[in-house]
Structure formats: structure tokens, C-alpha cells
Amino acid sequence: MLLLSVTEGDDKPAKYPVMVRAADQMLITKTDLLPYIEEFSVDRARAAVKTIRADLPVIELSAKTGNGLDTWLTWLVESVVAQRAELRRRPRKFFYTPPTSRA
């Protein structure tokens, strides 16, 4: 999960491409501040991400207004379900077995 706050600037994806490549999703946070931060452009941020990794899902989110929360929470729950299913498919190898107690 990569978080990009509108207060940080829309140039962060271009400055930190490794983080963009490693992320499963990017959230553009604090979008309720967009009317007050003229320097930030959601379009520029999305374009920068797209040049690095076109398939990365990007959600615009505001905890204050709730905008984007449903979309993000749906993605989060689906990701957890998929991860659990993947773990069930893998053979169990590295589980700690405590020693038996000697009475």
C-alpha cells in the first residue's frame, strides 16, 4: 500500500519509482484539501504512476469526508481473502512445534 498525501506533492511517484513498482495499490489521501492546495494535481499524480506502472490501482481518499473509503475497504477485504486462500494452498513448512514437556 502506497500512500500519497496531497500535501506531499504530485511529484512523489516520479521521485520514488521503486515504491510505485512494489505497491499493490496507491491511495491519494487528504483529497478534501485539494481546493486549498493548488499545486497538487490528481491528474499529474495519476499520469506519473501510469508511466511507472500502468496497472497499479489508484484510489482518491478522504478520511474526513469518507470519499473513497468504501472502494478502499472493499479492495482491502478482497486482498486479505485472496492472501488467506493463497496461504491455504501452500504446503506448511515452517511452523514451530514446541518441545513436549517432561513431567
Image (tube, rainbow, N blue to C red):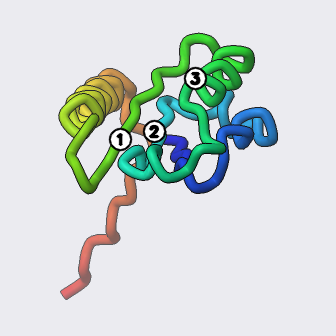
* Crowd class of label 2 (few under 14; some 14 to 19; many from 20; radius 10 Å): some
Q: Between 5 and 100, which is closer to the camera in this rendering?
A: 5
Q: Nearer the viewer, residue 102 or 50?
A: 50
29 in relation to 83, above or below:
below
Q: Residue at x 59, y 33 (%)?
A: 41
Residue 44 in the image, given as x and y percentages of width and height: 65, 26
In this rendering, position of residue 10 left or right of residue 99: right
Q: Is 20 rendered above or below residue 65?
A: above
**Nearer the observer, 26 or 94:** 26
Q: Are marks 1 and 3 in contact (CB under 8 Å)?
A: no
Q: Residues within 10 Å of mark 3 (few under 14, many from 20)?
A: few
**Element at label 1:** loop
Marks 1, 3: nearer the viewer? 3
Q: Earlier in the sequence, mark 1 or mark 2?
A: 2
Of the numbered discs 2 and 3, the one sitting upstream in the chain is: 2
Q: Residues within 10 Å of mark 1 (few under 14, many from 20)?
A: many
Residue picked out by circle 2: 27
Q: Which residue is mark 3?
A: 43
Left or right, residue 36 beside residue 54: left
Locate residue 21: give its quadrant: top right
Q: Residue at x 65, y 19 (%)?
A: 47
- Tell how many labels: 3
Farthest-out residue, bottom: 103
Please name the residue shown 28% across and 53% down the image. Answer: 63
From this viewpoint, is residue 30 visible? yes
Residue corresponding to mark 1: 61
Residue 56, horizontal then vertical, whole percent:
54, 20
Quarter that holds the C terminus: bottom left
Q: How far apart are labels 2 and 3 at the CA level?
A: 14 Å
Amino acid bearing label 3? Asp
